[in-house]
């Protein structure tokens, strides 16, 4: 079957739903090479503020592409994507950067910590980039590290931490400005079963405490079923949406 033809993005912005954190309206993503590959096909998806949602699907199904679009790391080929009431259609790179900075926190499978910086310094990076005063940065970093139960590891380097502790530092960094949306890409995929369960519980506890909208991409059905809602992606299409 040939891939669907890319059509221009809809430039007409619909009135946003203030109760909706993420709204995809017939969103498609094509990668053009010798042949056009449709990574996502006309996805319609609404995630309300405060929801905790998992996204599952086989390798190559489009779930990572979906996460990249939600995080503003890639652009849709067609359709409209609205994040926290703001359409991403046709906006400038500077404004998109501000949305990523202020609205979205990222948690990665491989932590992405800077090895020469301490826990405190790694968590402080986003705040320095936002120009926060030093005293406010110090107070927020200590607050975050206590929140993820690493107040005793403030000055340790990543190589001095366990895998679970590194992921806790990464979570603290993702929460630096308490973003309304938290995106997690296989957050337990690089951890053993027990540590993965601890990290999953931490994310769930933080979700309940902070009220953030959480989207977790995972291949682990245990992780997926721990979320009140699970979306299944296959061949670039949303094939199942289960609420518990």
Image: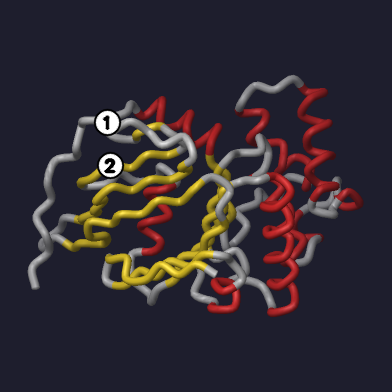
Q: Which mark is residue 33?
A: none
How crowded pointer 1 is (Cα within 10 Å; few <14, some 14-19, many 20+) is rated as few
Residue at 62% in and 69% down? 188
- The residue where tag 2 is placed is 80
Q: Pick out the residue farthest to the right.
A: 152
> Residue 53 or 129: which is nearer the viewer?
53
Give coordinates of residue 125: x percent, y percent.
66, 36
Q: Quadrant of residue 37?
A: bottom left
Q: Which of the image's four quarters has the C terminus?
A: bottom right
> Residue 198 or 14: which is nearer the viewer?
14
Q: Is residue 208 left or right of residue 7?
A: right
Residue at 68% in and 38% down? 176
Q: Is residue 25 left or right of residue 152?
A: left
Q: Is residue 224 above or below residue 166?
A: below
Give coordinates of residue 1: x percent, y percent.
9, 73
- The residue where tag 1 is placed is 13
How crowded pointer 2 is (Cα within 10 Å; few <14, some 14-19, many 20+) is rated as many
Contact flag, marks 1 and 2 (Cβ < 8 Å): yes
Give coordinates of residue 242: x percent, y percent.
45, 70
């Amino acid at each position: 079957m040939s891939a669907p033809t890319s059509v221009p993005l809809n430039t007409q912005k619909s009135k946003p739903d203030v109760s909706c954190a993420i709204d995809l309206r017939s969103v498609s993503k094509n990668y053009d090479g010798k042949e056009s590959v449709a990574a996502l096909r006309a996805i319609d998806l609404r995630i309300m503020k405060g929801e905790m949602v998992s996204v599952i699907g086989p390798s190559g199904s489009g779930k990572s592409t979906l996460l990249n679009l939600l995080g503003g790391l890639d652009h849709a080929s067609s359709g409209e994507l609205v994040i926290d009431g703001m359409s991403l259609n046709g906006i400038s790179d500077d404004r998109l950067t501000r949305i990523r900075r202020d609205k979205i926190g990222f948690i990665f499978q491989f932590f992405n910590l800077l090895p020469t910086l301490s826990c405190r310094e790694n968590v402080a990076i986003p705040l320095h980039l936002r120009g926060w005063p030093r005293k406010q940065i110090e107070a927020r970093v200590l607050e975050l590290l206590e929140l993820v139960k690493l107040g005793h590891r403030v000055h340790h380097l990543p190589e001095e931490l366990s895998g679970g502790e590194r992921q806790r530092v990464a979570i603290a960094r993702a929460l630096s400005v308490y973003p309304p949306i938290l995106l997690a890409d296989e957050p337990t995929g690089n951890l053993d079963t027990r540590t993965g369960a601890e990290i999953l519980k931490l994310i769930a506890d933080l979700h309940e405490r902070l009220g953030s909208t959480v989207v977790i991409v995972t291949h682990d059905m245990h992780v997926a079923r721990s979320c009140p809602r699970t979306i299944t992606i296959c061949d670039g299409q949303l094939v199942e949406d289960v609420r518990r």
